[in-house]
Image: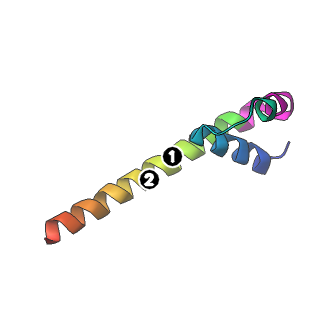
């Protein structure tokens, strides 16, 4: 599997929406190193999104 497929599998895993058949297929074909890298990238994007969201919310609350 290529890195794009790994990113897609990790993204679905973050959402918790995976069929067991799809999970079993991923286990067979995904490179574990790619999975770790994709998970770290996904977690970093999630944290950045949360920081931006909180700063936005604080900015709105401070202006009122």
Label 1 sits on a secondary structure element that is helix
Residue 33 in the image: x percent, y percent?
Answer: 73, 33
Left or right of residue 4, residue 29 in this image:
right
Indicate whether 21 appears above or below 50. above
Indicate whether 63 appears above or below 54. below
Query: Which quadrant of the structure image shows residue 56?
Result: bottom left
| Residue that appears at 31% across and 55% down | 54
| Residue that appears at 23% across and 60% down | 58
Give the main secondary structure of the magenta stretch. Answer: helix
Instruction: Return the residue at label 2.
Output: 48
Query: Which quadrant of the structure image shows residue 19?
Result: top right
User: What residue span does the magenta drawing correspond to?
Assistant: 24-34
Q: Which mark is residue 4?
A: none
Q: Are the residues at dot 1 and dot 2 in contact (C-beta closer than 8 Å)?
A: yes
Instruction: Return the residue at label 1.
Output: 44
| Residue that appears at 66% across and 34% down | 36
Label 2 sits on a secondary structure element that is helix
In the current view of this chain or complex, which residue is farthest to the bottom? 63
Left or right of residue 48, residue 18 in this image:
right
Residue 20 in the image: x percent, y percent?
Answer: 75, 29
Front residue of 1 and 15: 15
Residue 52 in the image: x percent, y percent?
Answer: 37, 59
- Quarter of the picture holding the N terminus: top right
Is 50 inside the magenta-drawn segment?
A: no
């Amino acid at each position: 599997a290529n890195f794009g497929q790994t990113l897609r599998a990790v993204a679905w895993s973050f959402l918790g929406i995976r069929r067991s058949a799809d999970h079993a297929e991923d286990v067979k074909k995904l490179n574990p190193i790619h999975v770790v890298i994709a998970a770290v990238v996904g977690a970093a994007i999630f944290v950045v999104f949360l920081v931006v969201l909180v700063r936005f919310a604080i900015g709105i609350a401070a202006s009122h």
